[in-house]
Amino acid sequence: MNINIHKSSPKKKGCILLPFFEDEVDHQLIATHAGESSELDFNGGFKQKLTLYPVARNKVLLLGLGKRNKSNQAADAFRNLAFKKHKRFGDRLIVLMDHLPEDLLIEAGIGLQMAQYKIGAYKTDQDKASGFFAAKYPVHVVHTSKDATSLFEEGVAIGETRNQMMRLVDMPADRKTPAYLGKYAQQSGKKHGFKVKIHNKSALKKLGCEAILAVGRGSEQPPVMIEMEYKPKGLKSKKPKLGLAGKGITFDTGGLSIKGSNNMHYMKSDMGGAAAVIGAMELASKLKLNIHVVGIVCASENSVDALSIRPGDIIGSYSGKSIEIIDTDAEGRLVLADGLAYLKKKHQPEIMVDLATLTGSCVRTFGYACGGLFSNDDDLANRLMEAGQKVRERVWRLPIWDDYSGDIHSDVADVRNFSGKPINGAIAAAKFLEVFTNEHPSWAHLDIAGVAFGSSEYTKMKAATGYGPRLLLNFMRSIS
Ligand code: BES
Ligand code: ZN
Ligand code: ZN
């Protein structure tokens, strides 16, 4: 997209896009661009679309954004329109938005950018793979806000990062190895301005990250821990340092406690937490946030092999605590145990947040509507809930009371990785992670198993959703 921001309608030939909130359709404004018309079958309902073809004038596309009090879903209306009707855009798109609040410029930027996501990247016929705007495709946006350019560009930046994260999550595990995730982070860091260090297998051995190594033991692809840091020059005032940790299982077979083959292919998405963390680092740097943030990604494949860890094995961990393996499919909490303990010890962040596609239990609890939130800090929990609500990437809180401590009790080691009971699985997983935060006073865990990957109107099969980076961006803004 070649973005041009204007204070008033450019006198150019192109396709005019006119968005309206539900029941706030301005017929006068439509008449200005399309001439008087009789009754229109359009009230601005969410994702409603109507094309007008006035004689000897620009074509006008009406888009419904839905109710004003649900403007946090507007990005999806723009995405839907651009995805479905981009052929009507022609050689130039003129988006008239001055009648809308300036925040909507972000939504428009995100939606138009995300519409270009190429789900069919591996098709031999790239014409059918979607992704339609050329880099030079002119998009003219009309809004009189003095911040119009930066707001729209912020939306495009968020959309770009989400597209990249979706590409990673949708990428099959034969291409997306732990090393590949590391390489992506390195390139992104170089491009956007954050530091990246890759801890390879021998470095992990030296550090004592025995839990990450244990999970990776059965794979031909060695595990890595990716350490990222963004610290703006001349960081203003004393703001809390944020530490993020992401589960980066590039494929989860379950290990020896092998999963059924039904839907096992979805387990290429078991690095959705890692994608959220890398995406957040990318956005913090791109948008030059006034915050010091460290991101840790624990990347490994959970495979079946003679070398794989077994149920009953006892492994060590970075924290020094021993872990009894009950189920090798509860591997996400193992790699995060090291990620969290390392983050706390090495960086001492004031706030720690981890994200993981951690449990099927969380999906059974919330479905696909929100992620699970677990925290020992009410203020942090509320901020995360608010940040998510604002951008429609919601999280909802569940308890981590001591009543659940029995679930991680082991007779033979310091903790066990699974209770063996088919109940309160998401909570038990959070209780396990809590041990490795080493009594950090302000920690939150987001179980995003149900929201990182799912059905969409853009694909016939399940695909990445791009959940996470925007929620974290909003959260970082709330503490910076
Ligand atoms: N990666 C899975 C969780 C998952 C399930 C993510 C569905 C996305 C969709 C995780 O590693 C896992 O297998 N969890 C087990 C834990 C159990 C063995 C204690 C689960 O939830 O069944
Ligand atoms: Zn698993
Ligand atoms: Zn997993």
Image (cartoon, rainbow, N blue to C red):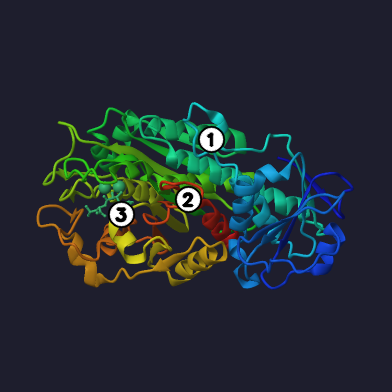
Q: Which SS class for mark 1? A: helix
- Can residue 232 be seen? no
- Residue to which mark 2 is pinned: 465
Residue 436 is tagged as 3
Mark 3 or 1, which is nearer the eye? 1
Specify the amino acid type for callout 1: Ala
Check the image and report above or below for 238 versus 319.
below
Check the image and report above or below for 101 versus 300.
below
Check contact, mark 2 vs mark 3: CB within 8 A: no
Residue at 39% x, 56% y: name it.
448
At label 1, counting other C-alpha atoms closer than 10 Å, the crowd grade (few under 14, some 14-19, many 20 or more) is: some
173 and 37: which one is in front? Answer: 37
Residue at 69% x, 66% y: name it.
41
Quarter of the picture holding the N terminus = top right
Quarter of image, res 400: bottom left
Residue at 34% x, 44% y: name it.
266
Specify the amino acid type for callout 3: Phe
Specify the amino acid type for callout 2: Thr
Q: CA distance from mark 2 to mark 1?
A: 17 Å
Counting residues from the start of the chain, the first of labels 3 and 1 encountered is: 1
Quarter of image, res 208: top left
Check contact, mark 3 vs mark 1: CB within 8 A: no
Q: Which SS class for mark 2? A: loop
Q: From the top left corner, tell me how far across and down residue 236 is, in percent.
A: 66, 55
At label 3, counting other C-alpha atoms closer than 10 Å, the crowd grade (few under 14, some 14-19, many 20 or more) is: many
Counting residues from the start of the chain, the first of labels 2 and 1 encountered is: 1
